[in-house]
Image (tube, rainbow, N blue to C red):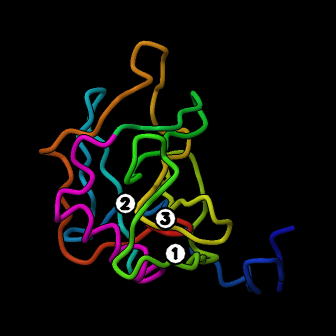
Amino acid sequence: MLGGQTTNALGSYDFTEMNLVQLDKPADGQDVAVIETNVGTITAVLYAEFAPNTVANFKKRAEEGFYDGKPFFALQKGIYAITGASNDEGTEGITDDGKYIENECSVNLWPFKGALLGYSTQQGYSDSRFFFTGALEITEENGTQRLYKSGNKCSGNTGRAYNSI
C-alpha cells in the first residue's frame, strides 16, 4: 500500500509526500548523461539532489572516460542491461576510495522502465556499475553491445534514478 508511513529495509518513507520527479519533463539545464551505444543514444536525467554520492561517482567515471567501450556484461531482454564494470566479467566496479557507495534511496525515485540505477554485487550498495531497467531492446544479435567513446557526456551536477543516478 502506498499510503501513510512505511518502513522497510531501505528506510522509513512517508508516501503522502511523494513527488515522482521521473515523470516530470526535464527542466532546461537539468543534469543529464548522454550515452551513445551501437543500438542508439540513451539520455538519462541525473538526480544529484537525491543521490549525490552515486551521481558524483558516475560523473567522475564518465568524465575520465572509464565507460568508453565498456560492454554490457549482463542482459535480460526487456528487463535490464548492466554495464560499467572494471572487468569484462562484470564482477568488479570502482570508486575513488575503493569502498562501495551505500544506496541513496528516495521515495521520489523508483525503478520504472528506463530508469538508470546504480549496481554492485554487494546488496544495498553500488560502485561504477549501473543498469537500465527494461530500457534497451536487447536481441541475440546485439547482446554484446559496447558503449561508444563519444557518448559518455555529463553536464553540470549529476544525479541517480532510484539508488539514484
Query: Is residue 68 located in the magenta-colored stretch of the structure?
Result: yes
Give the quarter of the figure containing the C terminus: bottom left
Residue, disc 2: 25
Q: x and y percent of residue 48 in the render?
A: 38, 79
Q: Mark 1 packing: few (<14 Cα in 10 Å), some, or many (20+)?
A: many
Which comes before the other along the chain, label 1 or label 3?
A: 1
| Element marked by disc 1 | loop
| Element marked by disc 2 | loop
Q: Nearer the viewer, mark 1 or mark 3?
A: 1
For residue 88, above or below residue 76 = below
Q: x and y percent of residue 90 in the render?
A: 48, 46
**Which residue sits at x=82%, y=77%?**
8
Which comes before the other along the chain, label 3 or label 2?
A: 2
Q: Mark 3 packing: few (<14 Cα in 10 Å), some, or many (20+)?
A: many
Range of residues picked out in magenta: 49-70
Question: Marks 2/1: CA distance?
Answer: 31 Å
Residue, disc 3: 161
Residue 100 is tagged as 1
| Element marked by disc 3 | loop
